[in-house]
Image (tube, grey):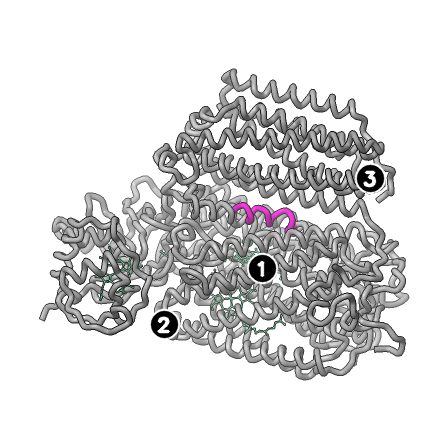
Amino acid sequence: MKNKESHITGYPTYAYVLIILLALTTISVAATGYHLGAYTVALALLIASIKVATVISYFMHLRSESLFLKVAVSGVFLIFTLVIIITFFDYLFR
Amino acid sequence: MTDHTVHTEHFDKEAGKLGMWIFLFTEMFLFGGLFLVYAVMRAQYSEDFHTAAEELNTFIGTMNTVFLLTSSMTVAMSITAIQRNERRLALFLVSLTLLLAMLFMVDKYFEWSHEFEYGVYPGSDVLKNMPHGELLFFGLYFMMTGLHALHVFVGMILLTINFIRIRKGSINQENFLLLENSGLYWHLVDLIWIFLFPLLYLVS
Amino acid sequence: MFSEASNVSAGVDKVFAFIIIVSLFFLIGITVFVIYTLIRFSRKRNKKAMQFSDNMKLEIIWTVIPIILVLLMFYYGWIAFAPMRKAPRDAMRIKAIGKMWEWNFDYGNGMTSKELVIPLNKAVRLDLISEDVNHGLFIPAFRVKEDVIPGYNNYLWFIPQYIGNYEILCTQYCGLLHSNMLSKVRVVDQAEYDRWFAELEKTSKVPEAEGLIVLRNTGCLACHSVDGAKLVGPTFKGLFGSERTVLVNNTETKKTVDEAFISLSVYNPDAEIAAGFSKGLMKSYTGVLKEEDMKKIQDYLKTLGETK
Amino acid sequence: MGGETYTSFLEYKGKYKGLLAWLLSTDHKRIGLMYFYVIAVFFFIAASLGVLMRTELIAPGQTIMGPQMYNGLFTVHGIIMIFIIVIPGLSVIFGNFFLPILIGARDVAFPKLNLFSFYLFLTGALLAVASQFAGQGPPDTGWSFYVPYSVESSTNVIFALTAAFILGFSSILTGINFIVTIHRMRAPGMSFMRMPLFPWSIYATAWIQVLATPIIGITLLMVIAERVFSIGFFDPALGGDPVLFQHLFWIYSHPAVYIMILPAMGVVTEIFPTFSQKPVFGYTAIAVSSLTIAFIGYFVWGHHMFTSGTSYFSRLFFSLLTFLVAVPSAIKVFNWVATLYGGSIDLKPPLLYAVAFIFLFMIGGLTGLIQGALATNIQVHDTSFVVAHFHYIIFGGMGFAAFAGIHYWFPKMFGRMYHIRFANIAWGIIFTGFNLFYFPQLVIGMQGMPRRYFDYLPQFNTGQFISTIGAYIMVTGLVMMLINLMYASRKGAPAPANPWKGVTLEWQIPSPPPLENFDVIPEIKRRPYFFGENEPDKS
Ligand code: HEA
Ligand code: HEA
Ligand code: CUA
Ligand SMILES: [Cu+2]
């Protein structure tokens, strides 16, 4: 791996990220008020995933990490999603 | 402690960080198991989960989300501060993070004691007389938030160590791996909460 | 060669045969080849090793052929399995109830039997119910097996094709006497089945002794038998009125079993330990067993008492 | 030990003296050896329990013990064998000792963490043994801890659960350590494609350790919570779901079987080229198939639950994937055989064990295919067929690979040589006994002899009897092997640096290796397993 000089992220970037995160939280709380049926969970999870992606790439600096780490992180999420889906092969088709 | 008097290895920062990331993967799967149980239970008892979730206080949950998100930002900023050799600012940011963590725990404390007052705690009679789905919901609730609170606690210890070492100067512009890794850990605690919050407080 | 005991058994056996033949082909083939290589290329005969390390064509061949073979195995396994999950609607339904450590077959209307008796050539569907932990119902000759899990509605079905007696075994580990949780299937012709069924109707009208029901529901029968078999604890058969050697504070004493003896044994089992058994196995039933139930047990044990 | 003077890691004196010099050492080789001793002791304990079980089964009815005792025995036998011996086994012993050397490093990435994992491991192991004696008697749930029985049983289940939990964490930390070591500490010039294949298999294994073990951790925690607080995740009386437990358990425990076998495959892959003086055939295929096994192996857990009332569709899915995961194993077998072909073969004990490994692994794997097919699984599930399958593949596979590895690397580890003829004879006895032992189990399993049975129907007596005799024969051989090795480790003739004419890095340094392995970190210019000038220089 290259011996890079550490990237330094400026304070304003972090502040913007926080604002986005808080805004998403507000949306997600507000959305519970509306009865969207089955879509509520989907929406809540979608918003949570966006938040998580933001935290990982900005706060945890995944953006500036090696390609290997990026692949590994996505791989971990992929495996976990697959495990859930495959478990539901049992529960949904019973 | 070691008998390696002739150790010639240079200090490998990348290795430390990589190790931390991989450790975080295992943490994700640790909670992942609980999320899987949650998903299956919820698919079977969605009605009960709904009624049980109504009893949780969304306000407290939301406040805690705000605390954690903000603390995530402050800890990330503290790394920038160290990188720019602004030690005072870094100390301030780390203590701010600790303060927010404290607030989170206090909130949690009130929430749990409120539930205990109503006789809702693991193994209680009130719980046993609830419909199965609600019982499961609360079981999961205590297990998930309990394990999460334990992680917050560990994170606080780490942050305190960082605080001391920044003051002593052993964490500095050249060497701040511990702070970076603690930051990563702290973000993970945040990540998990980001999922816990809608799943436990916002089910409808 | 293939079993025809049930409608699915021949299908299963064919899959066995297919996989075993393919397996033997590879096992023997590779083994012979390795032995040949070890001899032909031993250092004595072959001083200098050939140096090669790749062959794309070979690699592809031995990736593709196994893939085809395993897909075939998968397919045959599936085809022979498919009928096992499609019970016909008009199948005769019997509840198979598993509990530690016995099987009961419930024919409806409170008629239960310890043995599964079924008519020849009729589809039978067993609904699997567990009263405590996991069990597994296995009839080797029929090639059927499903787990009996509390809170689940699992089932299995088959058509018996030969008259005879077959074993039923419990295959899911369920505690102490897992290996004794056995029963039998008796496949009989229709006429005999009707006769047996009429008999069952008659006997099941006779109510069970109240004490026996209490014993069963409290779980005593897990450790004590009523037929003389030695389980964890001493049997109840012939107990009442007999003379027992018990350990009181580590000294052996002889006592005759009466109502008081039984009460003490149940409410404070460690006070007097029957000779040959260890302390702490039986827990006190104080607060669990009501006085009136105690009375029923005592009355029932009297009927099992010494009969000479 | 050559003419030049150096201090080997065995003799090196650091800050501490005597035993402490070992107990507090962070040297990867010393830690590897400590694991070796601890695991050998536990193997001996668990194996004795196995032999006791076999003795009980020599005849139907009660022979030497009652059911309570028997149930405790197979549970503790299973827990020790699985969680203490085969899951960590090869990767902590040979991984610790040889991984750094094979990639040209002086130690693992985090030596202190390594020592810490060792102590976690020791704690877990001792706790598992304590569960035998403390409190209410040995746990009797089977190593799979199926609920609801594991929640209801009044025995020491919590001890065993906690032990498994701690062992899991030790395994995770080791995994992290190895992944980072492989990423960061390879010698200059050693690209991933120039790395020997044992490190490759350790790499694949470490990823499974890291990604699967936490699941069992949390599952065991849930069972503990259920026992202590009656929370009710799995107990149907409280609305829980017993089958969900099985899912969670096997989500870990299936990948775990590949944690066991991958390092074993790595070990024999090192042995074949050395003893045939030929490069490994299909280097890339072997390396890639390790990763494929690790990845697909993650999604086949349901084949342990074909009779648990899981849905029709999921049974199909898991059966299909089970078959697919068998293919990379097949590829490896073909590559090993091709590696031998055309070599100049020196049939020494390590190679004998490695060849026996192929044979027994094939039987184990092919019986796995029978279990993977839906129709036949119904018949053999939870019978002694399964018992034979996994003893063939774990003991015959991983166990024999371990023996092969020990005989291969013994001179390097201890700087001494064992008696070769004696080792060959022991091998013969073990191999014969082994097949006599487990083959009848396959047969009676197909006829319907269930597993975990303390007592059995009379028609299975012949098979069980032969089995027990086979077990005794095998034990004789194992004891001979043990004696040979123990004697050699103290009194054996000094071994040269490279007794087998190997070409990987561990053979380029003295036996036993010096404290920091290499004076000068070597620079790697070509693929491993290069035995002459004939091979064109790839990559
Ligand atoms: C090291 C451990 C290990 C390994 C590597 C494997 C490998 C395999 N296992 Fe095994 N298994 C266990 C350990 C292991 N297993 C254990 C411990 C249990 C029981 C757990 C319990 O219940 O207590 C078990 C149980 C088990 C079951 C459940 C049985 C039941 O309870 O009903 C199944 C079902 O599919 C299965 C299948 C397989 C398959 C298909 C492989 C494959 O990966 C095998 C691949 C290998 C080969 C195929 C052989 C080599 C190839 C050739 C010779 C070439 C020819 C090949 C073809 C034509 C394909 N195993
Ligand atoms: C690594 C895995 C492993 C190994 C090696 C063994 C080895 C043996 N096992 Fe097995 N066994 C399991 C894993 C293993 N087992 C598991 C997981 C189960 C399932 C448990 C359950 O159902 O929950 C099981 C179940 C099981 C059963 C079935 C119980 C039942 O279902 O009723 C039986 C019965 O015969 C048995 C017997 C034996 C015997 C006689 C040996 C013998 O082969 C052992 C003989 C070996 C020796 C006597 C060794 C002497 C010591 C040395 C030479 C030390 C040298 C060491 C080093 C150099 C490191 N075992
Ligand atoms: Cu019932 Cu085993
Ligand atoms: Cu498996």
| Image location of residue B155, percent across then percent down | 65, 39
Chain where mark 2 sits = D
Tell me the quadrant of the picture where the N terminus of chain D can be found: bottom right
- Reply yes or no: does residue C113 show up in magenta: no
Residue receiving disc 2: D60
Evaluate whether label 2 is on the same chain as label 1: yes
- Of the residues shown, which amino acid type is indicated by label 1? Thr
Chain where mark 1 sits = D
Q: Nearer the viewer, residue B123 or D28?
A: B123
Chain where mark 3 sits = B
Q: Which mark is residue D123?
A: 1
- Of the residues shown, which amino acid type is indicated by label 3? Asn
Q: CA distance from mark 2 to mark 3?
A: 72 Å
Q: Which mark is residue B172?
A: 3
Secondary structure, magenta segment, majority class:
helix
The residue under the point 50% across, 29% down is B111
- Of the residues shown, which amino acid type is indicated by label 2? Pro
Which-is-in-front pick, marks 2 and 1? 1
Evaluate whether label 1 is on the same chain as label 3: no
Q: Determine the secondary structure under disc 1.
A: helix
- Mark 2 vs mark 1: which is more N-terminal? 2
Q: Quadrant of residue B65?
A: top right
Looking at the image, residue C10 lies above or below residue C37: above
Q: Which stretch is magenta?
A: D208-219
